[in-house]
C-alpha cells in the first residue's frame, strides 16, 4: 500500500451531517399486535426491531402530532412493551419516515434510532417464543380435551407397555456377547424372533379395539386422535426400518420397493435390539406375510402360464407397478425347464429408482441362470396407463400386485379395462387387493399412516362384473391378499 493510500485510510471519516439515518438491515420482524413503544400516553405498534432501532406503525392523524413533537424535541423516553410486559426503558430519536406501501388508509412507518443502551432483542425473542409455547400448549390441551378418556387411556397404556418392554430389551442388549460376532448375532436373532412372536400375539389384540373406540369420532376428533397416538407411540415404533419407511415415505408413498425387500429379506435390521424386534414383528405380522405370499402366488401364476403354453409359442408378461419384481426373480431362479423359450417380461413403474433396482436384481440373476428371457423396464406414470393404456398389446398375462389397494372403484374399473384391452384373446389380467379381513388395519392406519382401500371377494366381483369372458377370485394362504382374475 502506498503512503498516499495509507494517509487516505488514516484520515477517512463519516460526515455525521450528511449521513442518512436509517433502520439497520439486521432488523427482525415482530409478530403483529404484540410489541409496542409506549410514550407520552401513546402506544405505537412495532413492525421490526434491531439492536440500534425500530420501525413503528403510525396513523395519519398520529403522524402529524408525532412529527411536530419531534421537531421540537431531540429524543423521547419510552418503554418497550411485549404483550403488556415492559422489557426495557429506552431513549429514542427520530430517524426517518416513509409511507406504508401496503396501507390503504395512509399509515406511515417511522424509524427510530436508540440512544445509549441497545434494544434487548433477545429478551423480546424470548418472550415471543415463550408466548408461542404457551399458545401451543393451551391449544394442545384443548385438542386433547376433545378426545374421550377411554381412547386416551388406551393410548397411554400402549405407550407405557411399549416403554416397559423397550427398557427390558435394552437391558438384554447390554448383555449381548462381545467376543464372538456369530454368537452375538445368534443371541440378537433369537431374542428378536421370540419377542416379535410375542408382539404378534399382543399388539393385534390391543389394537383390535381401536375401531370401536373411534367409531363415533368426528373428522376433527379423528385428526387429533391420530396425532395424539403418533406423538405418544411413534418414537417407540418408527425405529423399526419397515415402520419408518411406511410412516415417513421417503419415496413419496408407503409400500415402496425397499419396504417389499424388507419383507422378503427377513433380515435383522435396526439401530437397537428393540428396533430389531419391532421390525421383525412388522415383517412377520399377517399383512407382511401376505405380501410375501403374494410373491409366491404370482410366481405360481407365471409358472402355470408357461406350463399351459406350447414351448414354441412366444410369451409376453407385464407387471404394472412392478416394485422389486420379486415374483419374476423367484421365477427366474426356478426357470430351468423353460430356458431358451421366446419370453419377454416387462416391468412398468412410475418410480424410476424402483425400476433400476428391479433391473439390477433381474440382470444379476440372469447372469447366472442364463435363461435367454428378455427383460424390459418401462418408466411410465400410472395415470398415463389409466388414460392411455399399457405400452404394448398382445400380452399373455398382465398383473398388478398392490396398485389397486389405492384406487377408488371408478379408477379401478378404468385401469382394469385398459389392462384387459392389452392382453390377447384368452389372456389373463390378475389384480391384487388387500382383504377387509386384514387384522393389521388399525395399527397401519393409526400409527403408520398407511391407508389402503380394503375389499371383499364380493366387492371385487361386483366392481369388475362384465369384464372379460370369465372372472374369479383367488387368495394367498392367509386370505389377507385377494386376487381377481379376469380372462379376455
Image (tube, rainbow, N blue to C red):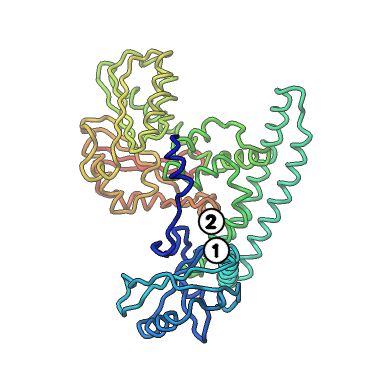
Residue at image coords 66%, 65%: 153
Picture coordinates of residue 11 (x, y %)?
Answer: 46, 49
Q: Quadrant of the C terminus?
A: top left
Q: Is residue 203 above or below residue 128?
A: above
Circle 1 Cα neighbour tier, 10 Å, few/some/many (<14 / 14–19 / ≥20): many
Q: Tell me where residue 227 sits by quadrant.
A: bottom right
Q: Tell me where residue 474 sits by quadrant.
A: top left
Picture coordinates of residue 3 (x, y %)?
Answer: 45, 37
Q: Is residue 45 left or right of residue 418?
A: right
Q: Secondary structure at mark 2?
A: helix
Q: Tell me where residue 378 sits by quadrant.
A: top left
Residue 168 has which mark?
A: none
Residue at image coords 53%, 60%: 226
The answer for how far apart the CA atoms under marks 1 and 2 are is 8 Å
Picture coordinates of residue 194 (x, y %)?
Answer: 70, 38
Q: Which of the two discs, 1 and 2, labels the residue nearer the N terminus?
A: 1
Q: Is residue 318 left or right of residue 434?
A: left
Q: Nearer the viewer, residue 425 or 150?
A: 150
Q: Is residue 406 left or right of residue 236?
A: left
Q: Secondary structure at mark 1?
A: helix
Residue 446 has which mark?
A: 2
Q: Which residue is mark 1?
A: 225
Circle 2 Cα neighbour tier, 10 Å, few/some/many (<14 / 14–19 / ≥20): some
Q: Is disc 1 in contact with disc 2, using a CB cutoff of under 8 Å?
A: yes
Residue at image coords 79%, 34%: 175
Q: Is residue 308 above or below residue 190?
A: above
Q: Nearer the viewer, residue 306 or 42?
A: 42
Amino acid at each position: 500500500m502506498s503512503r498516499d493510500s495509507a494517509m487516505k485510510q488514516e484520515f477517512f471519516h463519516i460526515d455525521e451531517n450528511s449521513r442518512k439515518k436509517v433502520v439497520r438491515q439486521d432488523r427482525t420482524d415482530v409478530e403483529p399486535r404484540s410489541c409496542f413503544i409506549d410514550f407520552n400516553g401513546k402506544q405505537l405498534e412495532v413492525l421490526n426491531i434491531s439492536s440500534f432501532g425500530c420501525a413503528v406503525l403510525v396513523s395519519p392523524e398520529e403522524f402529524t402530532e408525532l412529527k411536530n413533537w419531534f421537531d421540537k424535541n431531540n429524543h423521547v423516553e419510552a418503554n418497550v412493551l411485549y404483550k403488556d410486559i415492559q422489557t426495557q426503558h429506552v431513549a429514542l430519536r427520530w430517524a426517518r419516515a416513509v409511507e406504508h406501501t401496503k396501507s390503504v388508509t395512509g399509515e406511515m412507518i417511522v424509524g427510530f434510532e436508540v440512544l445509549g443502551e441497545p434494544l434487548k432483542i433477545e429478551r423480546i425473542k424470548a418472550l415471543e417464543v415463550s408466548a408461542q409455547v404457551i399458545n401451543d400448549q393451551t391449544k394442545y390441551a384443548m385438542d386433547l380435551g376433545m378426545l374421550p378418556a377411554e381412547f386416551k387411556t388406551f393410548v397411554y397404556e400402549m405407550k407405557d407397555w411399549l416403554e416397559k418392554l423397550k427398557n427390558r430389551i435394552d437391558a438384554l442388549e447390554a448383555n449381548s456377547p462381545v467376543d464372538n460376532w456369530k454368537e452375538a448375532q445368534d443371541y440378537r436373532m433369537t431374542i428378536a424372533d421370540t419377542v416379535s412372536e410375542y408382539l404378534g400375539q399382543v399388539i393385534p389384540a390391543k389394537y383390535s379395539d381401536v375401531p370401536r373406540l373411534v367409531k363415533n369420532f368426528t373428522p376433527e376428533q379423528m385428526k387429533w386422535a391420530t396425532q395424539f397416538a403418533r406423538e405418544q407411540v411413534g418414537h417407540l415404533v418408527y425405529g423399526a426400518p419397515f415402520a419408518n419407511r411406511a410412516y415417513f415415505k421417503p419415496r413419496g408413498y408407503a409400500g415402496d420397493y425397499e419396504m417389499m425387500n424388507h419383507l422378503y429379506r427377513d433380515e435383522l435390521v435396526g439401530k437397537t435390539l428393540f428396533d430389531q424386534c419391532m421390525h421383525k414383528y412388522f415383517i412377520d405380522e399377517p399383512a407382511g406375510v401376505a405380501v410375501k405370499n403374494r410373491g409366491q402366488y404370482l410366481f405360481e401364476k407365471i409358472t402355470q402360464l408357461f406350463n399351459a403354453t406350447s414351448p414354441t409359442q412366444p410369451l409376453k408378461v407385464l407387471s404394472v407397478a412392478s416394485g422389486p419384481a420379486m415374483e419374476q426373480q423367484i421365477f427366474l431362479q426356478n426357470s430351468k425347464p423353460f430356458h431358451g423359450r421366446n419370453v419377454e417380461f416387462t416391468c412398468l413403474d412410475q418410480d424410476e429408482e424402483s425400476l433400476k433396482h428391479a433391473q439390477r436384481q433381474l440382470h444379476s440373476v440372469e447372469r447366472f441362470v442364463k435363461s435367454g428371457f428378455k427383460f424390459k423396464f418401462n418408466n411410465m406414470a400410472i395415470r398415463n396407463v389409466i388414460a392411455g393404456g399399457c405400452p404394448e398389446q398382445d400380452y399373455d398375462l398382465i398383473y398388478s400386485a398392490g396398485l389397486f389397494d389405492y384406487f377408488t372403484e371408478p379408477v379401478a374399473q378404468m385401469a382394469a379395462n385398459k389392462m384387459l384391452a392389452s392382453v390377447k384373446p384368452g389372456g389373463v389380467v390378475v389384480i391384487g387387493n388387500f382383504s377387509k379381513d386384514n387384522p393389521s388395519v388399525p395399527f397401519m392406519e393409526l400409527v403408520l399412516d398407511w391407508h389402503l382401500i380394503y375389499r371383499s371377494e364380493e366387492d371385487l366381483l361386483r366392481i369388475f362384473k362384465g369384464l372379460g369372458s370369465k372372472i374369479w377370485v383367488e387368495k394367498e394362504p392367509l386370505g389377507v391378499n385377494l386376487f381377481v382374475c379376469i380372462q379376455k
